[in-house]
Image (cartoon, grey):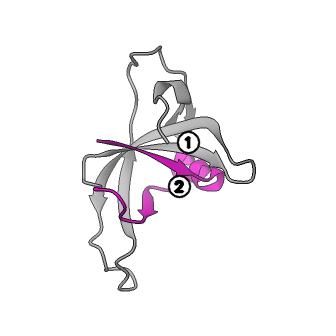
Amino acid sequence: MIHGLKILPRYFRAVTSGDKKFEVRRPDREYEVGDFLALNEYDDELNEYTGRCCLVKVTYILDRGVIMDADDVIVMSFTPCQIISSIYEKPKVTELGGVPMYERTAIGGLE
């Protein structure tokens, strides 16, 4: 399954540079190992998407409640993915720190 998610620019840069290899989220969806996260950069000051996104694959989910005995967050580790083709058009790929970054058209209108 592909989960389209908003991500703030500072975290998006950390993912695309290769420094951030995890995501902390509320368990409001049925995340599973093997799922994909389409991380869509969202500028919260402008209240709009920037049009940049990256695709990652969930490789591990930390058991709920392990961190600070909190059941209201989950931690997922991930690995970057590469989109080989698109039904819409060939995606534009830019390498940032070894992590592919894609134009929004390659992912579609996910939010």
Label 1 is placed on what type of residue? Answer: Gly
Residue 31 horizontal/vertical position (percent): 29, 55
Q: Earlier in the sequence, mark 1 or mark 2?
A: 2
| Quadrant of the drawing holding the N terminus | top left
Q: Which residues are magenta?
A: 1-30
> What amino acid type is highlighted by mark number 2?
Asp
Query: Which residue lies under the disc numbered 1?
Result: 97
Above or below, 10 against 104 in this view is below
In the displayed structure, 92 sits above or below 58; it is above
Disc 2 element: loop
Secondary structure at badge 1 equals loop
- Residue found at the far bottom of this picture: 69
Residue 17 image offset from top left, x and y in percent: 56, 47
Left/right placement of residue 78 relative to residue 34 reads: right
Rendered location of residue 46, percent (x, y): 75, 48
Residue annotated with mark 2? 19
